[in-house]
């Protein structure tokens, strides 16, 4: 049985795993997608089982049928927010 704190995450594209105590049910995560060699957002940990991490898609609430290897999930990374420059009013002539 997997316990919170025993889950590893892929730190970079090379696949080095490190323990991460923040991956537990209810936490927003990203999953590694090998077909595009990138992390995909929009998922949450549904459950932790012996076979891996049960993942739920945020967009429609569907729980994915196959568990993910713990090394293929990581906590969601913060998004950078861009601040837009203030719009300047155009002088009317």
Image: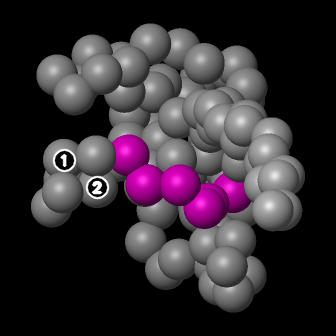
Q: What distance separates the C-alpha of mark 2 from that of mark 1? A: 6 Å
Instruction: Name above or below for residue 5 compared with residue 58.
Output: above
88 and 70: which is toward the camera: 88
Label 2 Cα neighbours within 10 Å, binned few <14 / some 14-19 / many ≥20? few
Where does the C terminus fall, quadrant-wise? bottom right
Task: Find out whether the residues at labels 2 and 1 contact each other: C-beta distance under 8 Å.
Answer: yes
Residue found 53% across the figure and 14% down from its top: 19
Label annotation for residue 63: none
Query: Where residue 21 sits: x, y (%)?
Result: 70, 19
Here the colouring is one colour
Residue 27 visible in this rendered orientation of the protein = no
51 and 71: which is toward the camera: 71
Query: Where residue 51 sits: x, y (%)?
Result: 46, 53
* Residue beneath disc 2: 33
Q: Which range of residues does the magenta coloring cover?
A: 39-44
Label 1 Cα neighbours within 10 Å, binned few <14 / some 14-19 / many ≥20? few
Label annotation for residue 37: 1
Residue found 47% across the figure and 41% down from its top: 73
Residue 43 visible in this rendered orientation of the protein = yes
> What main secondary structure does the magenta stretch of the protein show?
strand
């Amino acid at each position: 049985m997997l316990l919170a704190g025993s889950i590893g995450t892929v730190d970079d594209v090379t696949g080095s795993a490190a323990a991460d105590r923040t991956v537990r049910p209810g936490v927003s995560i990203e999953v590694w997608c090998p077909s595009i060699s990138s992390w995909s957002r929009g998922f949450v940990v549904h459950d932790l089982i012996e076979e891996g991490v049960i993942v739920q898609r945020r967009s429609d609430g569907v729980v994915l049928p196959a568990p993910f290897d713990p090394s293929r999930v990581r906590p969601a990374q913060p998004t950078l927010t861009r601040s837009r420059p203030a719009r300047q009013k155009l002088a009317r002539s």
